[in-house]
Every structure is written in C-alpha cells, then in structure tokens.
Image (spheres, rainbow, N blue to C red):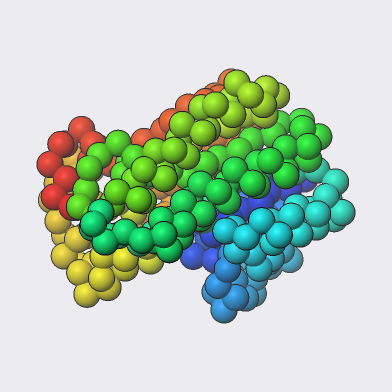
C-alpha cells in the first residue's frame, strides 16, 4: 500500500511510534524513525530492517530538527508522511510546577511538532498525497489529577492541527486522541502501579480493555492512505469508549 512512500515518525523507538513505524515498513514504506533514546533506537533499527532509517533527534531542540529536515531533503527530496508522535510528560501538582517542568512538557508535545511542520512543509508539498498526523490525547478533553501541563499541551496540539488545515492547504492534517494505551508511557504513573491501572481500565472502558499500540497505528496508516484523501482536519478519539463511559478513575 505504501510502496515508494517516505515517512517520518517521531518517538519511533517504543510504544505507539514503534508500531506505526513497523506497520509502515511492512507495507513497503521507507521510514525515517526519530527518537532521543539511542539504545532503543538501535534495537529498533536492527529489528525493522533496511527500510527503517534511524536518526537520533531530540524534538525539543530546534537545531537538531533543522539537521533532520536537511537530511530528509538531501536524501529524498520530498516527504509523504509526517507523524508527530514523540511524547512524554511530567505529571505534577499545579502548585509545584516550575519553568523546567513547563518547558519539558510543551517543548516535546507542542514545540517539536510546530517546528517540524514549519521546516518540512516545503518537502510535504512535493508529495502526491502529503499527510501529517499529530498525536494528541483524550487528556486534552478530560480532567485527570496532575495532568495540567500534559493535558493543556495536548489540547494546544489538537487546536494547532485544526489551524494548519486552513493555513497550509494542499497538505492533509489530522489529529488522533488515544485513550489509555498499554505502552511504556504508563510508567509515568509508577511502574509498580501499571497492572492496577490496566485492571481498572478494563473494568471501566466499554471495550473491556486498555488500548494496544496497533489500535492507534491502524488508524494512522488508514489516514495516510489513498483511502482517506478527503479526511482533513479530523480529530479521531481512539479510547475504547472511555470518554463516553464518563467515570475515568485516573
């Protein structure tokens, strides 16, 4: 389905990003996989084969983003898919937030995607079907304890996606809002608490389980395919019905 496609996936060395990269590679794409974790990135590079190109990059750093975008331009001359997936966060009480915590969350979750779109828009315009996926979160629409920075950054990312649809016509921009997904990101709640969280979620989500990385990756590939060329500016919640259930318990 994606033969000849050039895709850039950030946060590609674990969790959702890894599964997105894997599925693109399996469908014939060449994937430039970006992460700041060198060990995980090396392991991903070894497991996904020749069509996966590993590039170290901290999306908080404008100079590293510029170098990455120059590489893509020099190597390929265009870009078909950009998946702004890199994400983590510091969960903190509002009265304990300092400048470091604020910048850590917003630089990864918002500044990185903004700068990547800015620098890569010219190469995306050279594609026959350019598609950008921004990975937000249901946290953008619900209130959970100590999520204030993470949630507001994700809400800003969703709104940013909507603006891009109008400001950069010719490139499709869509946003995905995952619910509770079984990935290493859950360790932010404390690794020892993850089994209890998954059990809690299974009891409260109408689908009866936490999400899997492939649940998100499946939607990403569809949105970037020729079957979705009229889907633009959408925000797609993938949470097993969590938001409709109303009792989050997180």
Give the image location of residue 243, x and y in percent: 23, 36
Is residue 249 visible from the viewing direction of this image? yes
Instruction: Classify the position of the N terminus by image quarter.
Output: top right
Depth order, front residue of 219/194: 194
Q: How many marks?
A: 0
Q: Is residue 229 above or below residue 47?
A: above
Residue drawn 66% across the image and 68% down it:
56
Give the image location of residue 160, x and y in percent: 51, 33
Give the image location of residue 58, x and y in percent: 60, 63
**Left of 216 or right of it: where is 61?**
right
Depth order, front residue of 103/235: 103
Residue drawn 77% across the image and 32% down it:
125
Depth order, front residue of 95/189: 95
Residue drawn 74% across the image and 55% down it:
66
Q: Is residue 80 above or below residue 109?
A: above
Q: In the current view of this chain or complex, which residue is farthest to the bottom?
A: 39
Q: Is residue 2 above or below residue 166?
A: below
Residue drawn 52% across the image and 33% down it:
161
Q: Quadrant of residue 138?
A: top left
Give the image location of residue 164, x and y in percent: 59, 29
Is residue 87 visible from the viewing direction of this image? no
Q: Quadrant of residue 92?
A: bottom left
**Left of 103 or right of it: where is 130?**
right
């Amino acid at each position: 389905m994606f033969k000849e496609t050039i895709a850039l996936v950030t946060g590609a060395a674990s969790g959702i990003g890894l599964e997105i990269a894997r599925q693109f590679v399996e469908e014939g794409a060449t994937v430039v996989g970006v992460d700041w974790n060198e060990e995980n990135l090396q392991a991903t590079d070894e497991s996904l084969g020749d069509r996966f190109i590993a590039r170290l990059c901290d999306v908080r750093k404008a100079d590293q983003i510029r170098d990455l975008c120059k590489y893509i331009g020099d190597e390929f001359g265009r870009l078909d898919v950009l998946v702004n997936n890199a994400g983590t966060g510091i969960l903190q009480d509002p009265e304990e937030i300092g400048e470091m915590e604020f910048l850590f969350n917003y630089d990864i979750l918002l500044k990185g995607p903004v700068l990547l779109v800015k620098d890569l828009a010219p190469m995306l315009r050279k594609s026959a079907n350019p598609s950008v996926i921004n990975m937000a979160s249901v946290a953008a629409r619900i209130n959970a304890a100590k999520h204030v920075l993470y949630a507001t950054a994700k809400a800003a990312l969703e709104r940013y996606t909507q603006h891009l649809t109008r400001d950069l016509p010719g490139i499709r921009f869509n946003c995905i809002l995952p619910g509770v997904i079984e990935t290493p990101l859950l360790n932010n709640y404390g690794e020892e608490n993850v089994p209890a969280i998954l059990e809690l979620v299974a009891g409260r989500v109408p689908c009866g389980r936490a999400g899997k990385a492939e649940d998100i990756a499946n939607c990403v590939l569809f949105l970037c395919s020729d079957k979705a060329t009229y889907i633009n500016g959408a925000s797609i919640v993938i949470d097993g019905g969590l938001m409709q259930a109303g009792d989050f318990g997180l």
